[in-house]
Image (cartoon, helix red, strand yellow):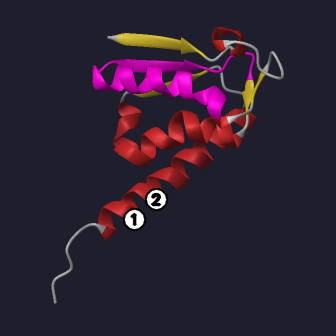
Amino acid sequence: MLTELSLHPAMFGPISSPRSLGTRPAAIPYRQQIETSIELGKVIVLDFAGVEATQSFVDELIGVVVLHHGRSVLELVKFRGCSDDMKAVIRFVISDRARQHDEEKSASRPVFH
């Protein structure tokens, strides 16, 4: 099953710019939809066509999800309509949060001497 989520700011009320997504709180409703799709085992396509987003927005949107689930969650999360700048931000956030996830996972393992 496939769910598509257009990241157009008008979907969740007024934001400072009609083409820019900038704050962590603005990302929360989108992330909640992502998490619901993941729980149901659905693939979700995030459509960035016509919008730009800050690193903070992207981190709250997908970074939190990757931190919780690890990089494997990307089997269910796909991206579309991303500018080159958006691709760079998304790659950075995913890489950083996947690294943090792996470090936390390693730190929680018992150490035997």
At which x and y percent is residue 46? 54, 21
Return the residue at label 2: 100
**31 falls in the magenta region:** yes
Side (left or right) of 4 relative to 19: left
Q: Identify residue type, mark 1.
A: Glu
Q: Identify residue type, mark 2.
A: Gln
Image: 103 above or below 40 = below
List the single residue furthest toward the left. 112
Residue visible at 71% across and 10% down? 10
Please tell me the numbered disc located at residue 103. Answer: 1
CB-based contact (under 8 Å), mark 1 and mark 2: yes
Q: Which residues, given as a range, are shown in magenta? A: 25-51
Which quarter of the figure has residue 7? top right
Residue visible at 63% across and 32% down? 25
Callout 1: SS: helix
Please indicate, yes or no, whether residue 73 appears anywhere in the rendered image: yes
Quadrant (top left/top right/bottom left/bottom right) for the C terminus: bottom left
Which quarter of the figure has residue 82? top right
